Image (cartoon, helix red, strand yellow):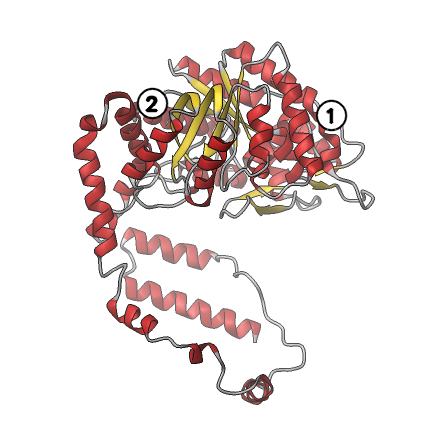
């Protein structure tokens, strides 16, 4: 699906911010990005990945990359993009002194934020597959098998919003038939560049969808699956169970599905069985949770995989979603209790879990008996640890009665007491979010890291800054 982008020492963040400040030129920024991609792909291949994901890497946001891929550039940014594609890209992300950026919002219920596409009835789409084809060729040149990953057309439109000035009632999904030929062209370009499989991510289909939206998904994949000049198509969903969309995708003329089987999405297992499985198709089974930081239950995952083997022509082991949502490597963590550290599974550790599961499927559990035993021990350690199970908290919880759910005084009395105690004006105001870091704060943090300032001195400076911010607001 994808991998953390920033690099082990936040190399991408430093390069991008350096470019914004004029300290790093475009060539150096692209060289840094290229090196990080290659390092990630080599690491994944070394850890046992049969295919490495391409196209998921981004200088800012993969949904913004999709807007560029389909030519959906807002009118206010077109001149900047035409003048300098990289500066125009960042202008869409950050805005300029004169032009507002695209809106940013949460990627489903994760902490990742994406830039919302702005579309209108007059939006025209044109294919620009340069990024996707270029990154595929980079991976192939390293001798690796690669699977390009794209945001699917239905999810792209469902996550978009009406462009400013658009009349009420416009739905971006109405542009689907206009968008599909552009995806067709991108897929043909990727096939010509050497892609055997291309993954189209459709996480929006795990949400409750209307019959019209499900019909749009059916139409989209009937169209794309029916093209002659295309790679094999793998349609992916994650973050929850697919619900009614599972039947739509299972019947579509695509070559495989990637499904989440963790947490609430474990319901996909019974739903897939009830639908008759995926005969003749590939199933990429997301049995390692790609969103949390904890060691997974490998034996439970193997049990799930054992059932899935009878439901598809080919079953591959995968994380439930992109590993973009977890840190890179637990081994790099310092100042963490060794016991707690043994419970961690970041991106590197999760790829190792996947390799273990794949080996167990191929060679049997005896081939990974020691790893499975260590996994059981880590799970048992966490389950029994006083760090996760505090007897005092359990005793307090057990002592809760129905009376604790009721206030001892009525609301009117409590409200009057609160007003008297706080003495707030009729419409109290406050700030939201946080104040930006100042140069002084950054300098203090740099001094702390360099050893020029001890912890007590650093905390004193921060406390003074907090006092100044509170005083300013008051």
Asked which secondary structure carries label 2, the reply is helix
Residue at image location 30% in from the left, 41% down from the top? 297
Whether residue 379 sits left or right of residue 6 in the image: it is: left
Q: Are marks 2 and 1 in contact (CB under 8 Å)?
A: no
Q: Which mark is residue 257?
A: none
Residue 441 seen in render = yes
Which residue is found at the position 49% from the left and 48% from the top? 111
Q: Where is mark 2, residue-wise?
A: 45
In the rendered picture of this protein, how many numbered marks are placed on residues?
A: 2
Position in image of residue 147 (x %, y %) = 47, 21
Q: Residues within 10 Å of mark 2 (few under 14, many from 20)?
A: some
Q: Position of residue 299 (x, y in %)?
A: 27, 37
Q: Is residue 288 above or below residue 188?
A: below
In what quadrant of the picture does the C terminus appear? bottom right
Q: Mark 2 or 1, which is nearer the eye?
A: 1
Q: Nearer the viewer, residue 216 or 169?
A: 216
**What label sits on residue 177 in the rendered view?**
1
Task: Report how far apart the C-alphas of labels 2 and 1 lie in the structure.
Answer: 38 Å
Q: Is residue 88 visible?
A: no
Looking at the rendered structure, the secondary structure element under dot 1 is helix
- Give me the residue at 65% from left, 21% from top: 222
Residue located at (33% from left, 32% from top): 351
Question: Which residue extends farthest left?
Answer: 370
Q: Is residue 71 above or below residue 461?
A: above
Quadrant including the N terminus: top left
Q: In x, y percent, where is residue 77?
A: 70, 36
Residue 378 locus on image (x, y percent): 22, 46
Viewer-proximal residue among 41 and 108: 108
- Pointer 2 or 1: first along the chain: 2
196 or 98, which is in the foreground? 196
Quarter occupied by residue 38: top left
């Amino acid at each position: 699906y994808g991998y953390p982008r920033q690099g082990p020492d936040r190399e991408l963040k430093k390069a991008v911010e350096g470019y914004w400040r004029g300290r790093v030129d475009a060539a150096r920024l692209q060289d840094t990005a290229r090196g990080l991609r290659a390092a990630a792909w080599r690491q994944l291949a070394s850890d046992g990945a049969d295919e490495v994901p391409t196209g998921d890497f981004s200088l800012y946001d993969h949904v913004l990359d999709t807007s560029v891929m389909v030519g959906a550039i807002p009118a206010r940014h077109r001149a900047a993009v035409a003048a300098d594609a990289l500066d125009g890209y960042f202008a869409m992300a950050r805005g300029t002194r004169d032009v507002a950026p695209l809106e940013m919002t949460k990627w489903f219920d994760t902490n990742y934020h994406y830039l919302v596409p702005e579309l209108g009835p007059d939006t025209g789409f044109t294919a620009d597959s340069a990024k996707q084809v270029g990154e595929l060729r980079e991976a192939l040149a390293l001798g690796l098998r690669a699977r390009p990953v794209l945001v699917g057309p239905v999810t792209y439109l469902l996550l978009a919003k009406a462009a400013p000035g658009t009349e009420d009632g416009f739905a971006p999904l109405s542009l689907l038939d206009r968008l599909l030929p552009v995806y067709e062209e991108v897929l043909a370009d990727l096939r010509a560049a050497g892609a055997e499989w291309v993954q189209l991510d459709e996480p929006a289909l795990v949400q409750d969808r209307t019959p019209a939206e499900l019909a749009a998904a059916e139409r989209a994949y009937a169209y794309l699956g029916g093209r002659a000049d295309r790679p094999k198509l793998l349609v992916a969903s994650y973050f929850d169970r697919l619900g009614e969309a599972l039947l739509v995708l299972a019947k579509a003329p695509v070559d495989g599905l990637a499904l989440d089987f963790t947490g609430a999405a474990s319901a996909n297992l019974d739903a897939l069985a009830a639908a008759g499985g995926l005969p003749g198709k590939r199933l990429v089974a997301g049995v390692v949770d790609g969103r949390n930081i904890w060691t997974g239950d490998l034996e439970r995952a193997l049990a799930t995989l054992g059932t899935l083997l009878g439901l598809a022509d080919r079953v591959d082991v995968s994380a439930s979603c992109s590993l973009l949502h977890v840190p890179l490597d637990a081994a790099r963590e310092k100042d963490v209790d060794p016991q707690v550290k043994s419970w961690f599974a970041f991106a590197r550790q999760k790829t190792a879990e996947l390799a273990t599961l794949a080996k167990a499927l191929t060679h049997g559990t005896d081939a990974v008996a020691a790893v499975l035993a260590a996994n059981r021990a880590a799970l048992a350690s966490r389950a029994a640890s006083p760090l996760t199970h505090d007897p005092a908290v359990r005793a307090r919880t057990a002592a809760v009665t129905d009376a604790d759910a009721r206030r001892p005084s009525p609301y009117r009395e409590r409200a009057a007491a609160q007003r008297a105690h706080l003495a707030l004006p009729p419409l109290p105001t406050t700030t939201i979010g946080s104040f930006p870091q100042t140069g002084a704060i950054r300098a203090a943090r740099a001094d702390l890291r360099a050893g020029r300032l001890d912890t007590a001195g650093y905390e004193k400076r921060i406390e003074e800054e907090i006092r100044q911010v509170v005083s300013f607001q008051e």
